[in-house]
Image: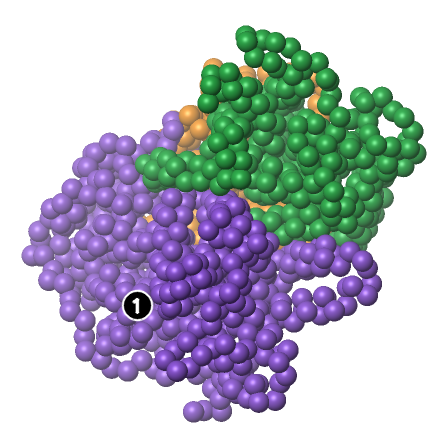
Chain colours: A purple, B orange, C green
Amino acid sequence: MSNSSLIARLPLIAGLLVLVLLPSFAGTFAVTLMNYIGIYALVALGLVLLTGIGGLTSFGQASFVGVGAYSTAWLTTAYGLSPWAGLVLALVLTGVAALVIGTVTLRLGGHFLPLSTIAWGISIYFLFGNMDSLGRFGGLSGVPPITLGPISFATNGAMYVLIWITVCISALLCWNLLRSREGRAIRSLRGGRIMSESFGINTFRIRLYTFVIAALLAGLSGWLYAHMSRFVSPAPFDVRASIDYLFMAISGGSGYLAGAIVGSAFTSVAKNFLQDVLPSITSNAGPFETVIFSVIFILLLQYARTGIVASVQRWLPRRALPMPAEAEEMPRRVMPEPGSLMLEVDKVVKRFGGLVAVNEVDFTVRTGEIVALIGPNGAGKSTMFNLISGVLGPTEGRVRFLGQDITSYGPRRIASLGLSRTFQHVKLRPTMSLIDNVMLGAYRRTSSGFLAGALRLNQAEERRARHEAMRQLRRCGLGDNPHELAGNLALGQQRILEIARALAADPALLLLDEPAAGLRRLEKKALADLLRSLRGEGVTILLVEHDMEFVMDLVDRIVVMEFGSKLTEGLPADVRADKRVQDAYLGGTA
Amino acid sequence: MTALLEVNDLHVGYGKVEAVRGVSMSIQPGQIVTVIGPNGAGKTTMLSALMGLLPSRGTIRYEGQDLQRLDVEERVQRKLCLVPEKRELFGEMSVADNLLLGAYSRRYKSSDFQERLAAVYEQFPRLAERRRQQANTLSGGERQMLALGRALMSQPRLLLLDEPSLGLAPLIVREIFQIIASLRKAGVSILLVEQNARAALETADYGYVLETGEIAHHGPAQELLQDPRLMTAYLGGAA
Amino acid sequence: MTAEIALILGVDGIATGAIYVLVALGIVLIFSVTRVVFVPFGDLAAFTALTLAALQSGQLPGTVWLVAVVAGLTLLAEAARLVRSGRARKIPSFAAVYFVLPMIPVLLCIALAQTDMPMAIEVILAVLLVLPLGPLLNRLAFRPIADAPVLVLLIVAVALHFALAGLGLIFFGPEGFRTEPLSDAIYEIGGTVVSAQAMLVVLASVVFMGLLYLFFEFTHTGKALRATAVNRVGARLMGIRPTVTGDVAFLLASLLAGVAGVLIGPITSIYYDSGFLFGLKAFVGAIIGGLVSYPITALGALFVGLLESYASFWNSAFKEVVIFSFLIPVLLWRSISAASHEEEEEEE
């Protein structure tokens, strides 16, 4: 291990050491506090995945904790069943509840989920408080301790072990998950639906699963809570508690798993401090505590949204990651016969209100060709791209790809047929590394799921995907520093990275939207060489480009658009000589 | 004569990438000045910075006053007006309401407002016909007219036009450029960003060619129009 | 349930629903102009009711201190911001509008609280006192992060609710209050008794909806608010300041909250934290309208009132659960209808 990676790992090693040694020197109070911190950290861990990484949020996490706690308390007290049966019920109920809430809200705008979770939180609170079998507002007492064979987790010290083992395992699973195929999909969510769906990611499913995972972690926390405190009542599960959890996740650093633990520790210690200090200042300590916490939270969101871990991280060296190892090649698609019909655009019309953006455009692309779509700004080229890739649906006309009518298909389905694209306005995840960005492109060629990712059963596939991503980075000239963050590249390089990502999907047809924009002369030449070699491999390319010099020497055919209609199409030399094309570019009409 | 707008060493960046690097230019009162150049040269970025929509470094003096200290709304108050590339109309509001809001910064008396409105309707009879229609039901050409008309409601002193010909048919482009030329007679100065280089230079007094964020050439519009380098910049190689 | 009871419950439901309509409209108004999902809306309504209750019992309402504290903090925060951006010269004009103006009803209240006033004056004073809270909270909590994602604004809004609830407890105490009814009269209409109070509620709600419509349709400021909601960049280019239209939206919403508070005060006991549930039920109405459409929102809120009335007859302990569970089919319907035209939304 190199020096810098040792320093980078220092906080983790120190943290684990403290965890192991703490019970031997700390008093009961500290152990109890640590137990609460661990229980909170589990919930916050889910929120880090959901809010910090996935860009969604929930004000109902405390209710999931409550469902977990009440499930096990009810089973163990009313039926005398084992706490382990309680754990199963706790996880099933929280999972199902999250599934239902997620299914009805996650297709809607981002604020519908949190609003619904507020309603869910209140409903659950009143449900707990009014059900006779749950002891109404008095709650359920006499919850038995957890036992495992001869071991009983009745004391705080024993619970400490159980809680922190659970926290460490959960954190490890989340860590693995984030470094897997589905984890990358979660991390891509903030880049927007269009981007993720263009690699074949079902964003709805990913969000739903992320929400369920967060709920399950909360349910697990509730189970531990019930058996630690041996008593449950509705009070700790109201919406205010949910806000506290959110505060923990965000104050710790909502983009980092460690932030969950740091944030819960910070919040718990601060609350303890306030509860010690406030009563000596005012007789109204309770509401003052609420006010102070809420105000700190608002200030945090206003001025330090990245949290504690992020500000510490800045001072630590980045861990030097090794270059990806060689691995078996991934299987490649069999390209269609050269010269066969690949893409057929048939009298396509797109209207936005009264504006006709694309008007009865026809053209075809054959296998093994490079075709350029050119025309002045606003001619409708990018709209055409969006119509082909399924981001927009045409008002009239049909689009056929590889013999299938894809007119009504969404981007995910079209991507899975073998179409990859880049975007005019670069859509990358700036906080993910180059190689992770490119591996997103290979999403559809891999298959391991959430569980496989969390348990690292995906390693063979991961190695192949990483190798493939590395291969694409190298051929695009970005192979030197695969762990660099995408956001640190110059704009032109980011466009090239998008091409590498598109290639990782092993496409039959590649749509490139202004690939040469922002490149220097030599880089343009390298790009042209790359595209030629791709053609040699049988990849078909349709590109929008403004740099005529780049286009003229490279492409087989040119389609010219103007005012939403097709002006002409033909060989580069003919198109260049066409007076109408010159006028379209320089403007001959005024 | 002092310049209406004097830009000196303007830099505009997005994060680590600088899109405009050290641009200097000036506009005299009553002039039409055009900025042409390929896509991605930084034209729109430059206009956004002049309007205050993006932060920038360098000096921008307008009527002798330092604009860097003023925000967008204060620049609008000083009769600086941008018609952006995306038009930014109020899509779910009527044409008449769009025009009404165009006059928002001026606080006209009712009679002055009616006079102004009549003048705009006279210049764009199509808008008068469609005054009750929602803006997002208009065609591309009509949208551009509404964007121009809305800008004119505030009686701007300097009009910044971003690609007014974008996506419009030749007949409408011609109409738009005629209107631009007529505005000069009404005493409005114009900074015209265009990719339709020929039309822009034929209308303008002076031109700047922007390439990768820097001024590559500049000169009187008529001279630039004869410059063979321009053809090369647009069509690549010898055409 | 007999037809007679159903009718009585219906009248009750419409009266409560009419109040929810006011709150829901305010929520949609703020959201469309500022993108803030203003969760503490109900708190403002509850504070108005508590203020009125205090005035009616001849006490100085805690709102006085609340407004003074919030106005003072806003002045400090904004002054610091102005100094930092080199615009210190604007401090006096800001102070005049955002500190001196809100302090007028505060001082009036301090002077008049112990005297015997006609009810109309008490009502006006209570509404005036709460009125500045909306714009002040906007400046204090949301203005510094006006460009943040909706999600962050929402989290701030929820945190703000808890701050307000805490302050409410400090300034109003834990007891519940009910204000005197605006009118005691009772009429018999079509076989059922209808209180003048209920009729007044419906009337007030209709009047304010009408005023809102006129404001948006016929005034410059109203149109500027709509313009900001439709296209923020476009509005800025016309010289319309989103911060100012945001304040106006909050001011209007405060007014709606104040009126709602005055109307609900006599119907049910109001506690310092009653506003949360009250606001969230109106939210259900707003969500039915997709946080966009005013007419559907109004219908939705009315429906929530009716649902609540019947649900509380069936089982009052579970009425909240019933109302919020109703969200599930609503959201399901919304997401199915959203799926069919989402491609248009993605257009840049």
A557 relative to A238 in the view: left or right = left
Residue annotated with mark 1: A451
Give residue A267's quadrant in the image: bottom right
Question: Above or below — where is B110 with respect to A508?
Answer: above
- Give x and y (percent) for residue A273: 71, 70
Give residue A380's quadrant in the image: top left
- Give x and y (percent) for residue A130: 52, 46
Quadrant of the rendering where the C terminus of chain A is positioned? top left
Q: Which chain is home to disc 1?
A: A
Q: Nearer the viewer, residue B76 or A118?
A: A118
Determine the secondary structure under disc 1: helix
C28 relative to B36 in the view: left or right = right
Q: Nearer the viewer, residue A401 or A66?
A: A66
Identity, as a three-letter code, of the amino acid under mark 1: Leu
B43 relative to C85 in the view: left or right = left
Identified at 30% across, 68% down, the residue is A451
Identified at 59% across, 75% down, the residue is A32
Identified at 23% across, 50% down, the residue is A413
- Give x and y (percent) for residue B52: 63, 47
Give residue A282's quadrant in the image: bottom right
**Residue A300 in view of the camera:** yes
